[in-house]
Image (spheres, helix red, strand yellow):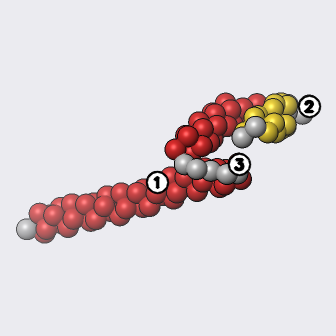
């Protein structure tokens, strides 16, 4: 049995019908809501002529957040690795003495 759910999401004054797994519904609805909020924010704060421009700005905003999180995670992982190597060096020095 196919457990698909049919929903409609409204983004930038357009309705998008989707067929999804029920587990995706909450995430998709939250994402659509964030996009709508960001669209309104851009329209209020900038002289935007076209919805496509606003949506492009939204896409850039979300993509840059994802990329920045990836960069931050990579840096954090490198810092942890450096600290673990330093700790290992200290332990090796204590064990050899």
C-alpha distance separating marks 3 and 2: 39 Å
Horizontal side, residue 96 vs residue 49: left or right: left
Relative placement, left or right, of 4 versus 70 is right
Q: Quadrant of the N terminus?
A: top right
Q: Which is nearer the N-term, disc 1 or disc 3?
A: 3
Dots 1, 2 in contact, CB < 8 A = no
**Residue receiving disc 3:** 51
Quarter of image, res 23: top right
Give the image quarter of residue 38: top right
Task: Return the residue found at the far left.
Answer: 97
| Residue with the most extreme right position | 1
Q: Label 3's element?
A: helix
Q: Secondary structure at mark 1?
A: helix
Q: Residue 33's spot in the image, x, y percent?
A: 63, 34
Q: For mark 1, what is the residue?
A: 69
The residue nearer to you, when weighing 33 against 73, is: 33
Of residues 3 and 57, which is closer to you in this image?
Answer: 57
Secondary element at tag 2 = loop
Marks 1, 3: nearer the viewer: 3
Q: Earlier in the sequence, mark 1 or mark 2?
A: 2
- How many residues crowd mark 1 within 10 Å: few (<14), some (14–19), many (20+)? few
> Badge 2: how crowded within 10 Å, few (<14), some, or many (20+)?
few
Q: Residue at x 67, y 51 (%)?
A: 49
Between the C-alphas of marks 1 and 3, the distance is 27 Å
Q: Is residue 56 visible?
A: yes
Instruction: Work out whether mark 3 precedes mark 2 in sequence or the reverse, and give the earlier one.
Output: 2
Disc 3: CA contacts within 10 A as few (<14), some (14-19) or many (>=20): few
Q: Which dot marks residue 1? A: 2
Q: Along the horizontal axis of the image, is 66 left or right of 24? A: left
Q: Position of residue 35 (x, y in %)?
A: 63, 41
């Amino acid at each position: 049995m196919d457990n698909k759910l049919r929903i409609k999401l409204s983004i930038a004054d357009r309705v998008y019908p989707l067929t999804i797994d029920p587990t995706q519904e909450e995430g998709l609805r939250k994402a659509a809501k964030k996009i709508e909020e960001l669209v309104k924010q851009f329209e209020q704060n900038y002289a935007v002529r076209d919805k496509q421009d606003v949506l492009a700005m939204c896409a850039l905003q979300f993509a840059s957040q994802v990329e920045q999180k990836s960069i931050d995670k990579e840096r954090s992982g490198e810092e942890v690795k450096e600290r673990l190597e330093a700790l290992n060096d200290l332990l090796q020095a204590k064990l050899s003495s």
